[in-house]
Amino acid sequence: MNKECEHLAAYVAFELSQEEYNRFEHHLSQCKACSSELKELQDAWFALPYDAEEADVPPDLKSEVMNYVFTEKSTEVSAERGFITTLLKWKCAIKPHFTPLASTIVVLLFITVAGLIYQNLQLNQVLSDIEESASSPVKITRTLALQSATPSSNAQGYAAVIETEYGRELIVHLNQLPKIQGEQAYQVWLLNDGKRKNAGTFRPAPNGKGVITYRLPDTDFSFENIGITLEPDDRGTKPRGKKVVGTS
Amino acid sequence: MKDKSDRELLQLIGENHRPAFEELYDRYIKLVYSVSLKATKGDKEKAKEIVQQVFLRIWTMKKNYDPDKGKFANWLITITRNIFIDYIRKEKKLEEKRQLYTRHESLKVAEGFPRQCGNQLLNMQLEEAKSNLSEEQRRLITLLYWEGYSLKEIAAMENEPVGTIKSRLHQSLKRLRQNLGTEGGVWDEQGM
């Protein structure tokens, strides 16, 4: 009989801490006196509940218990418990691998990554906003046929005014333009009441095709005709060359 | 199902076999309910809650039962006691909180504590008429087994060292075992 033996009754009554329990289990495997007395004390301990007076079980208790065990409510509870247990297990498994320094670094990395992810999400949002507006339909409000103004060329094409959410734009599309030489360039003019407005210059592709777009200044701006001239360079503010193609 | 042993039933329950679980319920409900009713001092609603928790735990923890470590009945009793003690301790905490708000009355409650213990002793004398335990031993069993006080708490209540309480428990269980040997004291026990 030594000091450990005093814990036998507490062991039987589940009154030992985990540490004491482990120590006593070890003691039990070595101490004959305790192991021979253990059964006796356990018999008494497990007989204690039979002191409860035998009660009449309510007949509807069974269905209530079965409902409780097999309904979603209790399975949810146990699923939740299962989840928490899994989390705790993970925590215990991971904890030994982290010193305070490592933990701090991991936390900082997490914060950085979270920040980057947030920024990325924001950018994606902005991008998708832009894409959304780009995908909003474009309305074509006016089309004009463009024909050659000189008998020596077959140049022809069309112009269109389109309306987007950013404003109105003019698109000019031409075919079979006479080839240019040197610094020469074609210049687009919008004509209204005898006034001319420069709508940009361009040099066509070697196959004679040319395209130009021009943002119309404001909603009040209008024009009647379009003329495209062949200019000696692309720096003119007034037409200097011949009209090559335009509305008839 | 009726002719199957507990061990066979538990094997089936391990495979999520509901009829086996219901048979197990039929076998042990009287014990679990009676114990729960005593632990809740006859409150049928509370006893029902405890019974539900016990069977839910058996169903969710069925894989944890190891027949080599002892009888199923003892495992079941341990589960039942753990649940009713949790239940009682929670209620005790609520009661303590409530008493904090009613300090004036609590003086009287404090005075009444030994009397309350006396009532419990009276109950216990009826419940344990069979046993030859001393009053101290019976009080210890009641406080520890049925009321969920720890050995330390009981030592503080009795104003005695924990070692004394431990050896009292030892003597009480030994004495009880001797009495059981002559008088039985176990009803409706189902072996494995």
Image (cartoon, coloured by chain):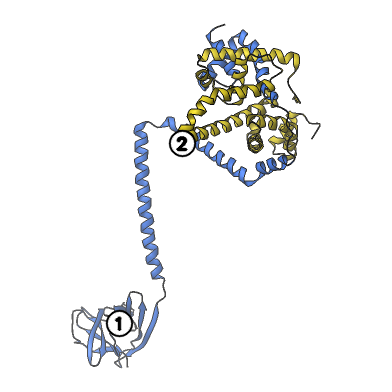
Chain colours: A blue, B yellow
Question: What residue is rendered at 69% in x and 39% in y?
Answer: B16
Q: Quadrant of residue A212?
A: bottom left
> Going by the image, does B118 lie left or right of A196?
right
C-alpha distance separating marks 2 and 1: 76 Å
Q: Residue at x 53, y 9 (%)?
A: A3
Q: Amino acid at mark 2?
A: Tyr
Whether residue A93 is visible here, answered yes or no, is no
The residue carrying mark 1 is A219
- Residue at the extreme top: A1
Query: For mark 2, does the 10 Å Cα neighbourhood hold few (<14), some (14 to 19), or many (20 or more) residues?
Result: few
B113 or B176, nearer to the observer: B113
Q: Chain of mark 1?
A: A
Picture layout, residue A12 above or below residue A77: above
Label 1 neighbour load within 10 Å: few <14, some 14-19, many 20+: few
The residue tagged with tag 2: helix, strand or loop? helix
- Tell me residue A83's x, y (percent): 54, 40
Mark 2 or mark 1, which is nearer to you? 2
Residue type indicated by callout 1? Thr
Q: Nearer the viewer, residue A90 or B42?
A: B42
The residue identified by callout 2 is B101
Percent position (x, y) of residue A248?
32, 93
Q: Position of residue A125 (x, y in %)?
A: 39, 60
Q: Is residue B5 above or below residue A185?
A: above
| Residue at image coords 67%, 20% | B125
